Structures are given as C-alpha cells and as structure tokens.
Amino acid sequence: MKHIVLQMAVVASFLITGPAVASSDHGHANHANHGATDRHPEMRTAEGVGTVQSIAEDGSSVVLAHEPITELRWPAMTMEMALADPALAELVKTDDYVAFVLRQTGETDYEIISIQAAPSQ
Ligand SMILES: [Cu+2]
C-alpha cells in the first residue's frame, strides 16, 4: 500500500507545482492497474524516450524527464530510474535526449537495461 500513498503525494504535487521529481519509488498513477493479467511480470520490458536531467555520481540511477510510455500507461513525468549497470551511466550525459529500455523488477519497480542518445524530435 505504500505506493498508493506515494501516488497521492505525486498527484498532489502535480496539482500544486506541476511535474515533480519522484525521488525514489515510482509515482505512476496507473501502476496499481497493470500486471493483473501478466503471467511473467518480471519479464516485462518497455521502451521510452526522454531527456536526462541528472546522473547519480555512482552510476546507480538517472533522473529522466520521460515522455508517455503507452505500454505501461505511464504519463510523461520527471522521475529517478535505477540503472541495471553503472556502465550505462557512461553512455549518456545531462541534457541528452535518450531512448531507453526498462525492465520490470518488481510489482512497481523498473530499471533501465539499455540507454543511448537519440535524435531529438
Ligand atoms: Cu515516470
């Protein structure tokens, strides 16, 4: 139920200040709705694009302003995403427009398994 509370916090911060950085856990409003029919949710992957806002010094995560990810029914938002391998952090830099692939690692947890600079739209 923890992420329900986080969802509400994210919704509230959207209402008050516009897009907000979700500092740790996911805040996607639709997470509670997906997965029910997935036999192997741990295998789910999805592709997305967005702009790198910052990169953790230890290469563990990046903050991305990502565009909507329709496969997951995620709206556009700015959020921190874990990197599956710190080496991925070496492939991009702040302000890069990037294409990335997410892999689901838990009910509401995802990590980036592929990321690369992409032509901006
Ligand atoms: Cu997001």
Image (cartoon, grey):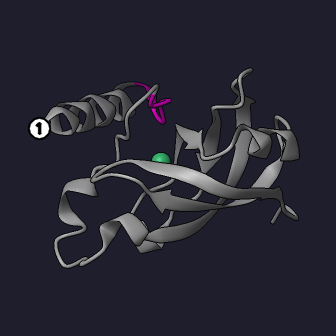
Q: Foreground residue, 87 or 110?
A: 87
The magenta stretch is 17-22
Q: Foreground residue, 57 or 66?
A: 57
Q: Quadrant of the C terminus?
A: bottom right
- Kind of residue at badge 1: Met
Helix, strand or loop for the magenta stretch, by majority: loop
Q: Position of residue 2 (x, y in %)?
A: 17, 32
Q: Is residue 21 left or right of residue 31?
A: right
Residue 38 vertical placement versus 23 (above, below): below
Number of residues whose C-alpha sits closer than 10 Å to that of mark 1, classed few (under 14), some (14–19) or many (20 or more): few
Q: Is residue 79 left or right of residue 105?
A: right
Measuring 50% from the left and 65% from the top, which residue is drawn there? 69
Measuring 17% from the left and 39% from the top, which residue is drawn there? 4
Q: Is residue 41 magenta?
A: no
Q: Quadrant of the N terminus?
A: top left
Farthest-out residue, top = 57
> In the rendered image, which quarter is residue 36 located in?
bottom left
Q: Position of residue 76 (x, y in %)?
A: 51, 53
Q: Name the residue tied to disc 1.
A: 1
Q: Position of residue 72 (x, y in %)?
A: 40, 67
Q: Is residue 18 magenta?
A: yes
Q: Position of residue 93 (x, y in %)?
A: 85, 38
User: Could you tell me how many numbered marks the image carries?
Assistant: 1
